[in-house]
Image (tube, rainbow, N blue to C red):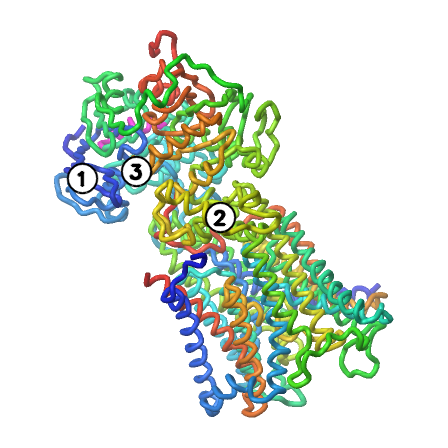
Amino acid sequence: MPNGTLVEMKGVVKRFGELLALDHVDFTLERGEVHALLGENGAGKTTLMNVLFGLYRANEGEVFVEGKPVSIRDPKDALAQGVAMVHQHFKLVANFTALENILLGTGRGLQFDKKAEREKVEKLSQEYGLVVDLDSKIRDLPVGAQQRVEILRVLRREPKVLILDEPTSSLTPQEADVLLGAIDKLTEKGLGVVFITHKVKEVMAVADRITVLKGGRLMGTVSVSGASEKELVELMMGGKEFARPLLDPSQIRRQEALSLGEPILEVSNLTVESSKGVAAVSDLSFVLHEGEILGVAGVSGNGQRELAEAIMAVRRPKSGSIKLKGVDVTKRTPHWMLAQGVSYIPEDRMGDGLLPTMSVAENLMLSHHYVPPYARGFVINYEVVEETAKKAVQDYNIKTPSVSTHAGRLSGGNIQKVLIARALLTPSKVVVAHNPTRGLDIATTDLVLKNLISQREGGAGIVLISEDLDELMMVSDRILVLYRGTLMGVLAPDRYDKYTIGALMAGRPMHEGGKQG
Amino acid sequence: MSSGIKLDEYVDKMVPYLIGIVAALSAAGLILAALGKNVLQGYATLLTASFGSTTNVGLLILKFIPLLMMSLAFSVPLIVRKFNVGNEGQFLLGAIGAVTVGLTFSDLPGALGLPLLLLSSMLFGLAWAAVPALMLYKFRVNEVISTILMNFISFYLVLYVATGSWRDEFAGHPETRPIPASFELPLLSANPQVSLGFVISIVLPLLVYYYVFKSVQGYELRAAGANDRAAYVFGINSKLLAPFAIMLGGALAGLAGGIEVAGLQFRLLEGMQSNYGALSIIVALIASGNPLGLFLSALFISVIEIGGSAMKATMGVPVETVYVIEALLLLFILMANVYRRRRR
Amino acid sequence: MTDLLAQLTDFFSLAVAVSVPYILAGQSMTLAGRTGVFLVFNEGVMLASASSTFLVAYLTGNILLGLLAGALTGAVFGLIMSFFSVTLKQDQFVVGLALFIMGVGVANMLYKIVIGVVSTPPQVPTLKGIGIPLLSDIPFLGPVIFDQSGMFYFAVALSLALWYFLYRTRYGLNLRSVGENPRVSDSLGINVFRTRYLATIVAGMIMGLAGGYLPLYFTGTYTPALVGGRGWIAIALTLFGRWSPLPVLGGALVFSVADVFGTYGQILDLPVSPYFLFMVPFIVTLVILVQVYRKAELPQALGKAYDRESVED
């Protein structure tokens, strides 16, 4: 197998506004190696590769391909240099067949020599064990097959470097095996493969070397033969340092043995389908108590959205039931749930939460707009609305020229503040908060958490769905872990340990005595 | 503090409209020149003919009344991003509803009959809009085409009624007998001729404004138009609001038809919908939801419509020229708006 | 019995002749729609090109020049449409409606300017049936299909060519991807903007021919009511044909039968007011629409402007 460095990235810095996404990161890729990029969500792994692939331009740093310095300004440049990337969200046209997608945008001339092209694709397919029904439409293919189509398409360009972004996140174990087999064959031929993932176990099985990133910083690069899982997780979770400001842990969590209040929300055997018709939540059961913050941990895309939407009655479950204070609410409407005192902070701020062309004040009012004091019968009392809005702007430090500004003009963080203010405007019985602090600065994060805690003090039950384990461990009274929509475990505070939770999040069941099988 | 708009922001918003007017008038000038007409005379006629005599002012008002109401009928569904292109048909059904009352219950005293007539016209217009509204709600049928098809059906319905048992034997043109004089909208002034319809057409937009911007339901409409998914997630039945808005538009257009019957034509007349439909679309799209803008645009369009007729009479310029200019006005304003937003 | 056959032959012969503007307008919308551009200006553009075709044919005595003028008119409207919806990213319905109004205005304005107001409307020579030897002697099928004007055969040929182009060529595949998922197409190097511009302009040309046909068949005159709602019905036809050339071609016949029923139905002496017969095409279309929307299958990106800058979730 020929040796040599395919890619070298030195001192890469990438900023998004004030956010430092990559902090002087170095990375190399050898010919014929599988190099895994490991880290939690938001660690910067995808960002680094997006720089290599030309989707982002680094603020500082150099990139070399096969020893030569290159300037990659867009994916076309990247492809010209032999760098190809398969993203988490596939670039496929759902209504076209697999073959059509593979051939899309390629070649010259009017005619398709369909037979010759098909043979070429089939040959590639055989070579790497990426079997796919070329005549099926993408929307009818399972995710694993879709991914194979995407990879085949990329392979036609004969790349030297193949970057795979979280490739196994939606695959079944069998499909993952097929993929790993294909990767083996690719590296045998001398390709370099970058494998972006957050799954520790997988990395050990597949990679030659592992680079760990956290918070945009390079934590270390090790070769697999010399590392243990535990070491890797420690690297990933940041080892000793724990930059947690402001909130004093002893003030937050009840140190005494958990004496949970009355059940307020009972979810039983809940199965909810995603928009694609696949079960996103499977036979899930849990109880939320008054005066409790129930943290829901899990990698994004494991059913959290469907769960939140089922509770809010935005999405009708396929089976199972949800009870609010003993009353079956499975078939209600969002209006009803909101009126009962169930508040929602959705994850998709722009899509599910914001009214961009209406004022900040009017946005704050949504879902309360028809009750006193905001409304008197059919008419809205805009004075009260404005007063309330002004107070919220102050309380949450929302940066806006005035409460009448169109909400769409606000920056992302401030939009989030509006949505949170809306949800916490009045005392609630239940709060469903999905990634409420994502993208917020530390001071605001703490403000939000403080508000959630005071709702809890007021007797509310809070479902806090978050990808930030630190946050969950800090404020939750219990943590429930979701993997593929099923309950992996519910942990009490004395069992809070990042490694344990991380393992559950990655789908590995708990064993007694804390041993990992 | 409640409007929060400063003076220069206001002026900034006006710029695209001014640019649009200037551009459209320039185009008009070019057309006039190409036709070998006196451009300056054309401008003068176009813009001032409406005010040239009390008769013309009367004509201006008679044009303005239905145009403003039809534009309302288009604007309300526009809030929830629906295009009620069928306001023309709803207008005609409103007219049919008006003559139905007028000719069936002709013995009623005016004080009862006139309100009944107007109510009937609203109901007929609402019913006509209910068909596409239902098709939208149940089958997700696009309202642009369903309402337009209803327009065409309404044309033939008018012909059927106007040539049926209510037809006016002595007219050379399909039309019904006139409604009883007691059902006519009282005149407020004889010269220029202004009926109560004028008052209704001013009051109604104010009511609609109040409804849209101050009421709970109006808020829900606007929210659904801003983001119907978010509105749904937060408890608003956005699926129901669009059909509802279309029916409301139908009622408004129907009322316009009723006022046209009770205030101007006094009968059902083939072709009485004139070009109010297309003009109202232009007015509403130019105003894009701004109530004052609706008023001013309707006024401006009415002015140049009268001007156009005058141009035809005095200069031999085809009236359709004005149509083209009006369409260009909309296009130029759209363009100017885009460039204004880009420059920020 | 031969009397019935003769009547049916007349009826369907007329229906097929009337199907031409439907076929052309439908294919025009299909082409543009497959790139994501939803045309609604049909009624206005068809009238404008009917007017320009008529006037040029009238002034030059040459039908082909007239049709050329019609096609050019359509192309201009297509260009304006693409500018506003693709470059300026304006709402396609808004622009379409504006152009519909402008088309009607331009059509009548030009006619008034050139012809003015006369007591007898002027006429142009009309298209005649091209009797295909041998085939046109077949009873029923002969006159109905094989003795139509050249435009009919052109429309059919265009439909087949469009089908082949869209589904059997590389360019067609790339073009369709623009209408399905412009973001993916763009990332694969397909020029979304150029594709939409070209498609819309060519679609405009075809729409122009659809309009141009109208004054040239049957009466040879022009009136403002010439299009008579067919432009709008063509929208329903395209939806019915699922934005696909062959079903649109077939579906056109359904709509043209309903169309002819209005005029022809009078001869049948049915005990209903003729006005209700005139309503038939529109009512039929409404009913069809309900069925169509039940199984909506359209290009995924239809009607949405493509903004490269916009952030996807």
Q: Is residue C71 left or right of residue B146?
A: left
Looking at the rendered image, the disc whose residue lies closer to the viewer, 3 or 1, is 3
A347 horizontally vs B302: left or right? left
Q: Residues within 10 Å of mark 3 (few under 14, many from 20)?
A: few
Q: Nearer the viewer, mark 2 or mark 3?
A: 2
- For residue C39, above or below residue A369: below
Query: Subunit of mark 2?
Result: A
**The magenta segment:** A179-191
Q: Is C74 located above or below residue A190 in the figure? A: below
Dividing the image into 4 quarters, which one contains the C terminus of chain A? top left
- Give the residue number, with chain letter if any, for mark 2: A385
Which residue sits furthest top?
Answer: A513
Q: Position of residue C294 (x, y in %)?
A: 63, 47
Q: Residues within 10 Å of mark 1 (few under 14, many from 20)?
A: many
> On the image, numbered disc 3 is attached to which residue?
A441
Magenta stretch secondary structure, dominant: helix
Residue matched to label 1: A12
In this view, the mark in front (2 or 1): 2
Which of marks 1 and 3 precedes in the sequence? Answer: 1
**Residue A402 point in image, percent of width and height:** 39, 52
C-alpha span from label 2 to label 1: 48 Å
Q: Left or right: A129 with respect to B119?
A: left
Asked whether the residues under the numbered discs 3 and 1 touch, taking CB atoms below 8 Å apart as contact, a structural biologist would say no
- Name the kind of residue labelled 1 in the image: Val
Observer-nearest of B164 and C172? B164
Q: Helix or strand or loop: what does disc 3 sit on? A: loop
Q: Is residue C49 above or below residue A136?
A: below
User: Does the magenta segment cover residue B1?
Assistant: no
